[in-house]
Image (tube, coloured by chain):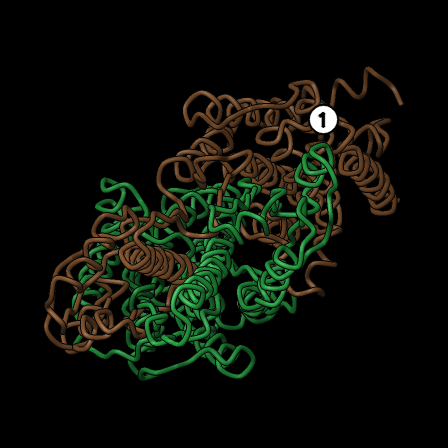
Amino acid sequence: MSYRRLRAIFVKELHHITRDARSLGMALAVPVMMLVLFGFALSLDVDRIPTLIYDQDQTQASRDLIKQFQASRFFDIRGFVDGYGPIQRAIDRSTILMAVVIPRDYSQNVGEAREAPVQILLDGSDSNTASIALGYAETVVQNYSLELRTDMMNRRGGEHGAPPVDARLRVWYNSSLESKNYVVPGLIAVILMIIASLLTSLTIAREWEMGTMEQLLSTPLRPAEMVLGKMLAYFVVGLADSAIAVLVGVYVFQVPFRGSVPLLVVSTCVFLMGALFWGIFISAVTRTQQKAYQISLLTSFLPAQLLSGFVWSIESMPKAIQVITYVVPARYFVTILKGVFLKGVGLNVLWGELGFLVLYGAIVFLLATRKLRQKLA
Amino acid sequence: MLRKEFIQALREPRMRLLLFLPPLLQCIIFGYAVNLDVDHARIAWMDMDRTPESRDLRDRFEGSGRFDVVAMPANEEQVQSVLDRSQAQAVVRVLPGFARDLARGRAAEVQVLVDGTNSNTASLILSYGGQIIAAYSSDAMGRQQNGRVLTRSPGSAVNASVPQVTARSRVWFNPDLYSRNYFVPGVVANIIMMVTLMLTALAIVREKEIGTMEQLMVTPLRPMELMLGKTMPFAVVGLVDVTLVTTVALVVFHVPFNGSFLLLLCCSLLFLMTSLGAGLFISTISRTQQQAMMSSFFFSMPAFMLSGFAFPIRNMPLVVQYVSYLNPLRYFIEIVRGIFLKGVGVGVLWPQMACLAVYGATVLTLSALRFHKTLD
């Protein structure tokens, strides 16, 4: 391996990148766009659920229950109706997600100390929002029920009591439960994967397509030098992207950063190298840019986005797919990122993940070099 | 011309694979892998009381089917490490004196510490855990009161009854709350977008790149014919993909399909106008295939993200919600979900269909004009 040849191919590749201003612009704009989308626009937080109320009872007792829903920040009471027809129409048109129906005998049941059912109708088509909304609604009703019973007991017993079990709920690491805090760190992995798959995979395929590969062949360049040199050029772009992502995440979106900066830098470099080697490997295998692009989209970008635990947690996947996620490098990097950002844990917890990334990078580098040598021979 | 394009699109086995594999792959990923449901959350149980009462509470957590106890930390350090290493998603801590407080009618405390890293899972765990504790509390109150009433006036058990408000919930359209019923219909929209937008742009730019565009232009082919020939095959492929995905959704994933398939195809056609138009437009602004890919990626990515496919539009800031009205994919996703899950027809969906039609006509005309100009 010669330093001079390595540098030559590195500089050549840098020229390629900077000359194609639009591709470079996009390589830098894509991360910013994704950050803005995820930081500002996209969230899974459920609040202000549009709700209709159908009060068949129309008594003080039923209005008392309605007040509980009005007071909760999770519900946005859009109005009162008198019939199932309007509820059906509103749910069909997706103007509301939930309806509370208080039956005619509600106050009677409460007054006579019987079980008083209240009906909650939900649009289940968005299953996640629906299950969270259901949880909130049931909690509102349960708490109100407890309150009623405590009141009644106090009145009867003439002494003050409290609900017997007091649940103290506390959230660690992301105490405001904002989805941006958990999406933005993982996003860095996805962004790096996009850069790797969109840009790198095309580099060697382009040389084949334009016929410059033959020219490179006539030089004393070795496969390993070519792989390393090309990787390093894109490495610069990738590092710039991750720096942008981290800075925007921490300063604009106020995502907490509790861990160590050196650990973040080291693991980013290791992951980036692995991802770039993989892109070059694909590029070496396929001979056209279109195929290289499609294959790298399928093998690196999609798994990084969907199977890394970035938004959709790995635990809720079926076992067979959970096994597949073990070979997705982004999975380990996402764990590291969330650990470093939110939990503030160090190498003593994350060494396994980092070790895997190192191993992955080394294996893919060897693969890419070997494949290229075969193709050249 | 049409035949040439069909042959070109289907000739290569790998290309054939690319036309039909991504739809199936997406279907499988969104049907099986990607879901936000939480069941069998891993919790650590720290019992500092060790009484029948605290064990009863633990049985309720495990018996609910939503929680699995995976660790029994004995001290604070272990609690910390269990959460740091993500071995458990939450720790439930029953404080000492739990049973005693319960018996004396004082507030007995149960702490739930949740790992909030994944805010969505965390809020589901919080609400499930809170419900179990509230139910336990409610039962405990019933027992307490019965005890009290019995000691005071034995024999008058009628007085012991207390009101209890219960929620009877009914979920429409997706009663089991499966994520896949929400995601898989969206895949239909997504696939058409991917197949038509990117492949149309690529097919045209490739002709430019390898120079066969000049050959086509010296033939007596009219620009209109050239354009139709370029887009029609992908429109057909798009419709075939819709049918494919719908079949897989019904047969493999048992996603309910309550509406009319004919309406779905009609709306797909409306949407195709927009995505083919956008594909044409991208082909006019790109010189190389790489640029075409990047541009179509840049176009489809935000369209996809802001369509309500995975992230509900309701949750976005108001400004972004208004912006999303400009997104054709948004209307199509609403239509597809309406047809699949709600079984609604033209009566409900006509505003979305009208928007798609207007959008499609505008985009297609503008791109066609631009395409003409670049040919001349």
Q: Amino acid at mark 1?
A: Gly
Give the tally of numbered discs.
1
The residue lying at 40 percent from left, 65 percent from top is B149
Q: Where, by quadrant of the figure, is residue B164 drawn?
A: bottom left
- Give x and y (percent) for residue A188: 56, 34
Q: Position of residue A351 (x, y in %)?
A: 79, 33
Where is the C terminus of chain A found, in terms of image quarters? Answer: top right
Res. B349 in view: no
Residue toward you, B13 or A148: A148
Label 1, on which residue?
Answer: A346
Q: As drawn, is A313 to the left or to the right of B375?
A: right
Residue A254 visible somewhere in the drawing: yes
Question: Tag 1, which secondary structure?
Answer: loop
Can you give x and y, in whole percent of width and height, for residue A177 in the image? 45, 40
Q: Counting other residues with Cα less than 10 Å from the Cα at mark 1, is it few (<14), some (14-19), or many (20 or more)?
A: some
Identify the colour of chain B in the image. Answer: green
Residue A170's spot in the image, x, y percent?
Answer: 50, 39
Q: Which chain is brown?
A: A
Looking at the image, which is closer to me, B288 or A202?
A202
Query: B132 above or below A253?
Result: below
Q: Is residue A126 above or below residue A183?
A: below
Chain of the residue where label 1 is placed in the rendered structure: A
Q: Nearer the viewer, residue B197 or B214?
A: B197
Which residue does the image show at 73% across and 50% down from the upper left? Answer: B71
